Each structure stands twice: as C-alpha cells, then as structure tokens.
Image (cartoon, rainbow, N blue to C red):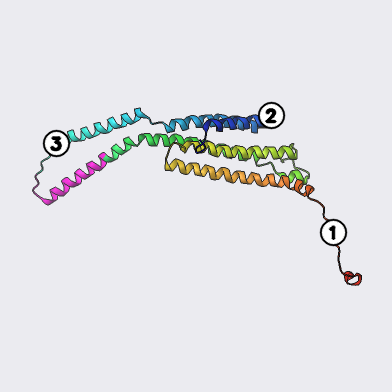
Amino acid sequence: MYRKLDAERIVTTVQRLRDRIHERFPELSLERVADEFVLVARQAVQRAVWLSQPNYWLRVFAGLLSAALVVIILGIVRVLKVSPQVDRVSELFQAVDAALNTLILLAGAIYFLLSLEKRLKRRHALAQIHELRSLAHVVDMHQLTKDPEVLLAGGQGTASSPPRSLTQFELSRYLGYCSEMLSLIGKVAALQVQHYNDPVVLSAVDQIEDLTTALSNKIWQKIMILDRPLDQAAAPTLPAPQSTFPGPLAKE
C-alpha cells in the first residue's frame, strides 16, 4: 500500500496547493502557475497510465510486418534460385558476405519494428518530463526577485526595482508554496517511471529530481533568512559576565 506513489492523491495535493495559493495570493501571478500545474499533473497521470498499459494493436502490427518481411526475403531467395555449388573460394566468400549482410539488415528491420512501441512511449514520456522541467524553471523565476534581505534591511529602491508589497509572513508563505510546488513537480515526474521501466526516461526523471531539489534548497535558504530575526528576538538576553578578580587586578 505504501510502496508506490498514489497518482490520485498527488493530483489532490496539487489541487489543494492551488487552492491555498488562490486564497492567500489572489492577485499574484503565482496562482496562474498553480492552475497550469494542476492541468499538467492531470495530463501526466493520464500519460503514466498509458505508459503502463501494453499497446497490443501496435505489437500485432509490428509482428505482422516482421513476418511479412521474412516471407518477402525468403521469396526473393527462392526466386533467385541461388546455387549451393561454388567453383572458387572467392565466390564462397562473396556468397557468405551477401548472406550475412542480408541477415543483418533483416535483423535490424525486425528490431526496429518490434521496438516501435518502446520508442513511441519513450518519446511521449520525455515530452512530459520536458514540460515538467520547464514548469520548474517557471516556478524558480517567480521566486527569483523575492529577496528576504531587502525586506529585512529596508532601503530605498530604484526605478527598476521589482515591487515588494509582501510582508515578512506573506513572503515566507510565498516561498513555501514555491518549494512545495517544486517538490510536487518531482513526484509527478516520478509517476512516469513507476510502471514503465526505461533507462532513458528514468535518467530524465532523476535529473528532474536533482533540479527541483536544488531549486528548493535555494528557496529554503531564503526562508531561513526570514526566520533568523524571529529566532534572535526569541533568544533570552544574558547578563554581562562579571570579573571575579579583586579590584586592582580587574582594572588592569
């Protein structure tokens, strides 16, 4: 029960995150990113289900084409009426070389047809992962100008400075939502390989996990900066240490 990701619960979590962003920041563009993420998550779940199911029609089509190709090759060999007798060693080598080339081409054509389903699924999975990677960069762009040090230190902004209308608490929640969205992007990407074992797609999913983790760590550094003044304010004030030495020695 707890050994695989539940696609429906992941989508529900994404929708709940979207609702929280709508309720907290109804005027900011992050809510539109959350709306888009819900659509991408639903599409990714549907694609993950499609990847896990065998395509029998494509398999039958590839098998029939492979069988037809073998029959055609055998028919050509039969029509040519190749004689098994050779008079020279060079003719024997030429016949063996031609036969090997034909077998190699035939094997390559059959492998191409039989691996058609795998390559088709890989292309669709990589397209989905590429979309998730782009979404992760979009989330990172939205938190890029949310600088906690500027908020805490204050100062006069320039004409080109981005608007800074969020309070300390709102900025902390904004960054937290971005971090959650990045984490969920990694989980949605992992759905693509949960029931589809392909090394190329698995490597792409690992890259998404590394990307979202790195971006999330960068966001958490900002959150720690925001929480730092609160920790300092909550820390008790210790009295100044007093010297235990006699008066004249303490003056020295």
Q: Is residue 25 visible?
A: no
Q: Which mark is residue 80?
A: 3
Q: Reading the chain from its start, which is encountered first: label 2 or label 3?
A: 2
Q: Nearer the viewer, mark 1 or mark 2?
A: 1
Of 4 and 164, which appears nearest the observer? Answer: 4
| 35 with respect to 201 (left or right) | right
- Element type at mark 2: helix
**Dot 1 alpha-carbon crowd within 10 angstroms: few under 14, some 14 to 19, many 20 or more:** few
The residue under label 1 is 240
> Is residue 91 within the magenta segment?
yes
Q: What secondary structure is found at the residue carrying circle 3?
A: helix
Q: Quadrant of residue 169?
A: top right
Residue at the spot x=53%, y=42% of the render? 208
Q: Earlier in the sequence, mark 3 or mark 1?
A: 3
Between 174 and 87, the residue placed more toward the observer is 174
Residues rendered magenta in the picture: 85-106
Instruction: Name the residue nearer the viewer: 154 or 3.
Output: 3
Q: Is residue 37 visible?
A: yes
Residue 227: in magenta span: no
Determine the CA span between mark 2 and mark 3: 78 Å
Q: Which residue is mark 2?
A: 23
> Which residue is found at the position 47% from the left and 44% from the top?
203
